[in-house]
Image: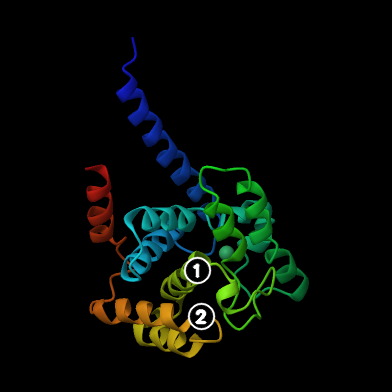
């Protein structure tokens, strides 16, 4: 006979594994290195922790980060993988991925935040983002957190002829986006994380210390 406890833990592990599998689907064809979604999830969780969120809230933001870009599976490959900048009509198509993601996730009633993260992670604090043009605190806080984690990872993963974008440039871009693209308070938290990351390892090595700290604790 199957032990109930064992079955329960097995189901929980299966849920985690399925969420990671879905996150990999979203990352597979992207511009970024693999594990983009995992890194966004981890940075988001760290920001949430520094904002004083409970462990359950931190973990939910992690899950939202994991699946924020799932809607990219509905965007044609040639647009997702295009290395030149997108033409207007291509960009319009790309901008559909938050709504596609929200639609994919909308019936996951156990974690309603998943659809929230997918739908609003490209909103901007000044109201000029998409898909809904929400402004300031009208954007759910979790989505404001994911937006900055996502932007940080996009910039610190960006490669060109001179290698990875320099940390001071990434920092300057975040600073510049305070109050326009980003929630200024959350941007300050991200800036502190950048300043503490003296060797600029937060992106290049999957932040193992974060994984250990959180998942070690959660499994207890
Ligand atoms: Fe996105």
> Crowding at label 2, few (<14), some or many (≥20) Cα neighbours within 10 Å?
many
Q: Residue furthest toward the right?
A: 89
Question: Sequence-wise, which precedes: disc 1 or disc 2?
Answer: 1
Residue 210 drawn at (x, y percent): 27, 60
Residue at 68% from the left image edge and 65% from the top image edge: 94
Quarter occupied by residue 90: bottom right
Q: Looking at the image, how many numbered discs can be counted on the residues?
A: 2
**Mark identifier at residue 141:** 1
Which secondary structure lies at badge 1? helix
Label 2, on which residue? 182
* Of 47 and 151, the residue lying toward us: 47
Locate the C terminus and report the quarter of the image it occupies: top left
Report whether 33 appears left or right of 213. right
Residue 190 drawn at (x, y percent): 37, 77
Q: Is residue 29 above or below residue 46?
A: above
Calculate the distance from the C-alpha at mark 1 to the C-alpha at mark 2.
Answer: 11 Å
Residue at 68% from the left image edge and 67% from the top image edge: 95
Q: Is residue 104 above or below residue 50?
A: above
- Whether label 1 lies within 8 Å of ligand 1 gets the answer no
* Of 52 and 22, the residue lying toward us: 52
Residue at 73% from the left image edge and 75% from the top image edge: 87
Residue 170 drawn at (x, y percent): 41, 82
Residue at 55% from the left image edge and 75% from the top image edge: 137
Q: Is residue 21 above or below residue 187?
A: above
> Of the residues tagged 1 and 2, which is closer to the observer?
1
Ligand 1 placement by image quarter: bottom right
């Amino acid at each position: 006979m199957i032990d109930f406890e064992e079955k329960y833990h097995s189901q929980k592990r299966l849920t985690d594994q399925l969420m990671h599998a879905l996150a990999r689907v979203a990352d597979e064809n992207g511009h970024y290195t693999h594990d983009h979604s995992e890194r966004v999830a981890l940075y988001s969780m760290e920001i949430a922790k520094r904002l004083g969120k409970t462990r359950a809230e931190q973990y939910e933001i992690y899950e939202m980060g994991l699946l924020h870009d799932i809607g990219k599976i509905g965007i044609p490959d040639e647009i997702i993988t295009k290395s030149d900048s997108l033409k207007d009509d291509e960009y319009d198509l790309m901008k559909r991925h938050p709504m596609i993601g929200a639609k994919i996730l909308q019936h996951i009633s156990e974690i309603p935040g998943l659809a929230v993260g997918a739908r609003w992670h490209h909103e901007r604090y000044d109201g000029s983002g998409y898909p809904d043009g929400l402004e300031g605190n009208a954007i759910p806080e979790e989505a404001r957190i994911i937006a900055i984690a996502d932007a940080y990872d996009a910039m610190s993963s960006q490669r060109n002829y001179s290698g990875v974008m320099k940390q001071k440039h990434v920092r300057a871009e975040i600073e510049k986006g305070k109050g326009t693209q980003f929630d200024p308070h959350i941007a300050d938290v991200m800036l502190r994380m950048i300043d503490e990351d003296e060797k600029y390892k937060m992106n290049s090595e999957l932040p193992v210390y974060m994984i250990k700290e959180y998942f070690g604790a959660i499994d207890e």
